[in-house]
Amino acid sequence: MSHELPYIVAIMEGLAEEMARDPKVIYYGQDVAPNDDHDLVKAFGRDRIRVSPISETAEIGMAVGAALAGYRPVVELLMSEFMLVAMNQVVNEGSRFRQMSGGRVKVPLVLKSGYGFTAGWSGQHTGTIYGMFTGVPGLKVVVPATPADAKGLMTTAIRDDNPVVYLLHYLLTLVPGEVPDGEHAVPFGVADVRREGTDVTIVAIGYEVGQALEAAETLAGEGISAEVIDPRTLAPLDLDTILSSVAKTGRLVLVDQSTRHGSFSSRIAADVAEYGFGYLKSPIKQVTALDATVAYSEPMEQYVLPNPAKIVDAVKQVLGSAPVPA
Amino acid sequence: MTELDTDRLTWIYRQMVRIREFEERVKRTFEDHPGVIRGHTHLADGAEASIVGSLAAMEPGDQLTATYRCHGYPIALGTPTTSIMAEIYGRADGLCGGYGGSMHLVDPERGFLATSGIVGQGIPHATGAAMAAQLDQAGRVVLCFFGDGASKQGAFHESLNLAAVWKLPVVFIMENNDYNVGTRSDQEDANAAVGEPLATKAKAYSIPGVTVDGGDPLAVHGAVQTAVDRARTGDGPSLIESKVYRLSAHGNLIAPPGVPLHYEEHEAIRVFGNREEYEAARRGDPNPRFRRHLVEGGTLTTEQADEIATEARDEMQAAVDFALSSPLPAPERALDHVYA
């Protein structure tokens, strides 16, 4: 059984259910429920639901301290760029404490933040910057693409004993989808094969999963069978599922809204080149944002971003049915 | 101010002596056993009275965080000095298995939650632990140790503001040694530049701010106890500026591989050529000062004070011997504990 929820509501359902299940879960951040009439405040009280000043270093650092003292804080960071203000606390404190202590402490916390708001937000609020958080030992990074995964990954993030950067895509905020009834936890490090296919593997991240599925539908109409994989979590990454798919199809297209040279797709490309080179019948193709700050004006904004047409084109290139540009 | 009994006074003195002896053995290691200590160490010699006077105000269950200058706290908390020295020597039997080293000691079972090697960044950790204490309603208090330099970091200001707004049970203890490595406070601190105490910063957050002689463990204890009591009763945080003088350089020489590590002279001499400032601090050394106080006041006999010194020497010799004989970790253990 399932129920339909918008992506953002599914996230908050996951959070509220974990708060109800575990009194050690707390939620705070800028502009979080300043009014006592808020449902979360009524359900969990002012101690566990707090509105904080605009102080990212303190907000994230305090989550580290509260986690060390036995809590499971979820920090609302609104936009992923706000984490840049406090980057040391994100990548160089709590994420290292487990190992630097020789396993004596654990730091369970969730940094909840939106990204990729390419809807006229110009250059400082549109970034797809998970590449800055992946590759940091001790830190986990999740990028749900559907309401079901949005809820299930929030549940797992809160229960995980490590710091987790939970990134929701702003363009998906109101997109509805079926969410399983009752407790729903999606395991980390398990990719979802969203569409099976035999000719080409498309690995798409976050919002790009939907774009890739749209492209796959178009390609199907032309007799091309594309497999679409959603990694769901970037750290840990389910490389096995990707390699198995590439072993089957022999071709790989990667879709990532990050700028090309800060992208996560380039890391998948490197791993597949290293561990799956023998499977490849043609070079890997990446469809990423172009290396520019996202412009405000819509034509320029859209120009740099991946879209289904670019994905279709990339697939045809790896299949050898479209000219490869120099 | 709470009157401390003979046992407590003796405990304070013993911990001060133990910390001093430990730090001197760390320093001597660079000469006695070159290459055994890697990277950067920061010593607490000169700050013993401030550290122990502060910790004397803790109750069971209370917690603390500190900086990379972190050897003194666990010594006073009762962490075995063998395991602390072994950690500094990078050994498998070290407190943190050789993963953290000198700058990152922690002992959560004794309330020592965290250290940060990045200036000021541990302040929000303490503040968050205080939020946990408030949520637990267990009457726990968190002591937050940091240096004067950290008070120019955003982390300091954000944390004091938040702790004040939420009335968190935390005591911010600034060990002001008047130097940021080799830069004097009056060169980089707005309060110091006009001759005002750094505790003035508390006014911006409408919390108590006091300045205390960090060389006097009883004065420190009194100030910290007042702040701890206030925190425990739910009245929120305080800022204590504890004026100390570090008797060693900021840390051992920062040098590329191939250059033997050692401690240079204090920055007062090395940077500013002010030998008299340093010698005056030596003459005012808090450890012999407190010994005189206890002996003259009849709390300790000379023989008892000597005995404490002898025991500390024996203990730290054993710590060095233990650390030297402890094996280095197996290389492949480097991948353990990345995730919980």
Image (cartoon, rainbow, N blue to C red):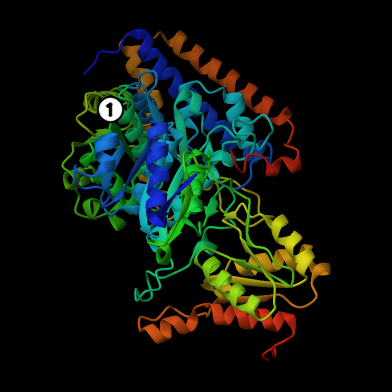
Snapshot quadrant of residue B31? top right
Q: Position of residue B41 (x, y in %)?
A: 54, 42
Residue A21 horizontal side relative to residue A323, left or right? left
Front one among B23 and A153: A153
Parent chain of label 1: B
Q: Position of residue B130 (x, y in %)?
A: 33, 33
Count of numbered circles on the image: 1
Residue A87 horizontal side relative to residue A266, left or right? left
Front one among A55 and B191: A55
Residue A128 horizontal side relative to residue B136, left or right? right
Residue A4 horizontal side relative to residue A238, left or right? left
Snapshot quadrant of residue B280? top left
Residue hosting label 1: B224
When the figure is inspected, residue A195 is found, relative to residue B291, above or below; the finding is below
Front one among B75 and B296: B75
Note whether residue B278 is visible.
no
Residue density around tag 1, few if under 14, some if 14–19, many if 20 or more, within 10 Å? many
When the figure is inspected, residue A245 is found, relative to residue B16, above or below; the finding is below
Q: Position of residue B70 (x, y in %)?
A: 47, 36
Picture quarter with the C terminus of chain B: top right
* Residue at figure coordinates x 79%, y 72% from the top left: A280
What secondary structure is found at the residue carrying circle 1?
helix
Front one among A104 and A243: A243
Picture quarter with the N terminus of chain B: top left
When the figure is inspected, residue B236 is found, relative to residue B34, above or below; the finding is above
* Residue at figure coordinates x 69%, y 55% from the top left: B258
Q: Position of residue A261 (x, y in %)?
A: 58, 74
* Residue at figure coordinates x 39%, y 61% from the top left: A173
Q: What residue type is disc 1 on?
A: Val
* Residue at figure coordinates x 49%, y 81% from the top left: A304
Note whether residue B216 is visible.
yes
